[in-house]
């Protein structure tokens, strides 16, 4: 009887484990379906309504990495400019602090370009490069894949200064929450659909 109970308990654990695997797989599929990999057209009017040219100040929180284990709290000074017609140029000055000790870890600048290319209709592309002491430390490139009436999501590939890893499944959603505020989130998903690296940024027009 004891042997039978042990086998029954083992089977129960196997069933629970199988259920967890199935749930994780379903979550991963939902993530992939939401952040579609296909490039979409984004009207310039929508881009400019979300990323209105002007000067912004903001803060952000970055999850912990193998380099910055406590995570980071950052302060931002941002300028968005119209660049050659429907394109946008963003200069984002960043001061990054340890999220727990408040120690200044680095200061840098992120240069971001939102471009429409010839022969690509209204497909929108995003190019980002970050510098510390005039040295290139990170970059990413991708295209718009999802849009709503107040947000645009991008599928990106690249690397971040805050981590030694390369990322091929970066999803960046930029949302205009009101007339003054922009929310930006970067998320890197693991193979099981869990958040591997999250960067939340919020900017207010001044």
Image (cartoon, rainbow, N blue to C red):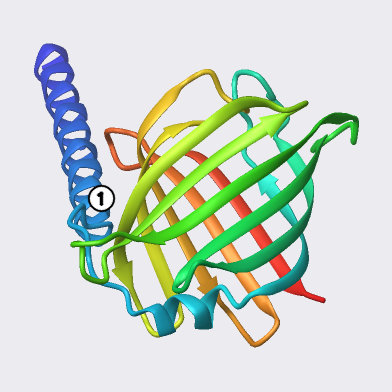
Foreground pick, 170 / 45: 45
**Is 86 positioned to the left or the right of 29 in the image?**
right
**Is 188 positioned to the left or the right of 122 in the image?**
right
Measured as percent of width and height from the top left, residue 86 is found at 44, 73
The relative height of residue 44 versus residue 34 in the rendered view (above or below) is below
Foreground pick, 140 / 116: 116
Measured as percent of width and height from the top left, residue 28 is found at 24, 46
Residue located 51% across and 83% down the image: 49
| The quadrant where residue 170 appears | top left
**Is 113 positioned to the left or the right of 56 in the image?**
left
| The quadrant where residue 22 appears | top left
The relative height of residue 53 versus residue 14 in the rendered view (above or below) is below
The relative height of residue 82 versus residue 136 in the rendered view (above or below) is below
- Which quadrant does the N terminus fall into? top left
Residue located 27% across and 53% down the image: 31
How would you rate the neighbour count of disc 1 (Cα within 10 Å): few for under 14, some for 14-19, many for 20 or more? some
Measured as percent of width and height from the top left, residue 198 is found at 54, 44
Residue occupied by mark 1 = 27
Residue located 50% across and 67% down the image: 84
| The quadrant where residue 151 appears | bottom left
Measured as percent of width and height from the top left, residue 99 is found at 79, 38
Q: Residue furthest top?
A: 3
Residue located 38% across and 62% down the image: 153
């Amino acid at each position: 009887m004891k042997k039978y109970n042990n086998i029954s308990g083992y089977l129960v654990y196997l069933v629970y484990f199988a259920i967890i695997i199935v749930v994780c797989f379903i979550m991963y599929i939902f993530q992939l379906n939401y952040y579609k990999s296909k490039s979409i057209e984004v009207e310039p009017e929508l881009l400019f309504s979300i990323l209105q040219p002007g000067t912004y100040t903001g803060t952000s929180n970055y999850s912990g990495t193998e380099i910055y284990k406590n995570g980071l709290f950052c302060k931002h000074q941002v300028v968005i400019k119209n660049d050659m017609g429907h394109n946008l140029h963003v200069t984002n000055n960043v001061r990054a602090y340890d999220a727990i000790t408040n120690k200044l870890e680095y200061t840098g600048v992120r240069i971001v370009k939102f471009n429409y290319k010839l022969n690509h209709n209204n497909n929108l592309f995003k190019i980002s490069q970050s510098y510390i002491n005039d040295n290139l430390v990170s970059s990413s490139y991708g295209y718009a894949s999802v849009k709503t009436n107040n947000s645009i999501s991008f599928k990106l590939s690249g690397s971040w200064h805050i981590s030694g890893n390369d990322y091929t499944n970066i999803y960046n959603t930029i949302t205009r929450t009101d007339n003054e505020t922009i929310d930006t989130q970067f998320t890197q998903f693991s193979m099981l659909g869990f958040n591997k690296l999250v960067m939340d940024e919020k900017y207010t027009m001044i």
